[in-house]
Image: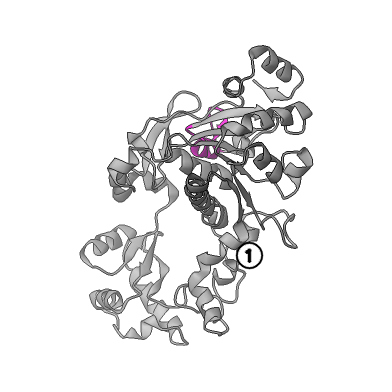
Amino acid sequence: MLPESLRHRRPLEGVRVLDLTRLLPGPFASLVLADLGAAVDKLEDPAPGDYLRHMPPAVDGQGAAWQALNRDKRSLVIDLKHPDGVAALREIVPRYDVLIEGFRPGVLDRLGVGHAALRALHPGLIVCAITGYGQDGPLAKRAGHDLNYLARAGVLGVTGPAGAAPAVSGAQMADVAGGALWAVVAILAALHDRARTGVGCVADVAMSEGAVPLAAFALASLVAGERPRPRGDNVLDGGIAAYSTYLTSDGGAVALGALEPKFWTAFASAVGLDASLDALVPGPHQPGLKAAVAAVIAGRTRAEWEAFARSHDCCIEPVLEPHELPADPQHQHRGVFFEAPGFGGNPTLAFRTPVGAGADGAHTPPRAAGADTRAILREAGMDDARIDALASRGAVGV
């Protein structure tokens, strides 16, 4: 969380962002920028628009995930396959500081609004392209999703037990950490550079390579010139008893992260296990140690282990299910979840990004597709007669 004085200053106030993306990576990046004070306009095509609008579960007829990612943004509908729609985009681009896009390389060029063309219109424009494999290279135009990018990045190669297929993460790590957050970093750096030079740039963010640093500790073996140990047999991938997950007596689970000697000693001594530091070293002795820890953990409920953690400093935490998060005391204290205006006008549960004001901010609800098209086009100098003519030809949605 930012210091309160900075959080309420909205450091990106005055920055205008045009978001052409769908699904998760781009919308999450523009959500962070909006939380920092930027004015974000989201552009969608007439149909189907952002696919997340239609993905269940839905609230008031709109996908809940879409609503979570698209609060505090205006909605603009332009058909970029229509020549008049492309012309409309070219007219509004000079009003923006940042344009975020997630098309495969070459798509915008075919439409006549590639990166070079956009920056010719507006030399100060910062274009951030978020793609799976980047703007060049043998895989540049290949389709993919989070799982594919994690596979190419080596993250799946260190995820899951030995002797089994790599585990599928329940969190979209490449989309968010490999794509959205690197995009925000690139945009902030580009804004700083433009303040000095007056010149924009193109930020090429590839989720596959953005995810590579997520396996930083596993990559250490490459730096050392060694072949990594097999998946599931390393310190940080479940290969040691002191750093793993265990089931409790009531069917819950806890995560034990006693990596440092002092934490393992504190845990082992408190539960009557051998406190030998061999527990911190991978090797053939680990299956027996894991079985011993598993038996101890299985002797208490998750709540009992939560109580244990309050009195023993040994890095053990409950594994919370998503529905439990809003009631968690730590999340409540930090204001991670709050009520925000929903699409249908009723309050809905929202999550605060670490840089956002949360309940302390003035939030606007997610908008119906094209709800702000007319206002945005007017700001670019178009009169209502022209906007109506564009709408009648299907170039824009109002």
- Reply yes or no: does residue 59 show up in magenta: yes
Residue under pointer 1: 151
The spot of residue 382 in percent (x, y) is 64, 19
The stretch in magenta equals 57-72
Can you say whether 131 is above or below 62 in the image? Answer: below
The spot of residue 272 in percent (x, y) is 26, 78
Residue with the most extreme left position = 311
Using the image as rendered, state which of residue 119 and residue 284 is in the foreground. Answer: 119
Q: Amino acid at mark 1?
A: Ala
Q: Residue at x 65, y 59 (%)?
A: 148
Can you say whether 334 is above or below 385 in the image? Answer: below
299 sits to left or right of 136 = left
Q: Residue at x 66, y 36 (%)?
A: 121
At mark 1, the secondary structure is: helix
- Reply yes or no: does residue 293 show up in magenta: no
The spot of residue 224 in percent (x, y) is 52, 83
Using the image as rendered, state which of residue 147 and residue 46 is in the foreground. Answer: 46
Residue with the most extreme front position = 197
221 sits to left or right of 352 = right
Location of residue 91 by image quarter: top right
Using the image as rendered, state which of residue 320 and residue 77 is in the foreground. Answer: 77
Q: Could you tell me if residue 24 is visible in this image?
A: no
Using the image as rendered, state which of residue 51 and residue 6 is in the foreground. Answer: 6
Q: Could you tell me if residue 116 is visible in this image?
A: yes
227 sits to left or right of 328 = right
Residue with the most extreme top position = 385
The spot of residue 58 in percent (x, y) is 55, 34
- Crowding at dot 1, Cα within 10 Å, few <14 / some 14-19 / many 20+, comes out as some
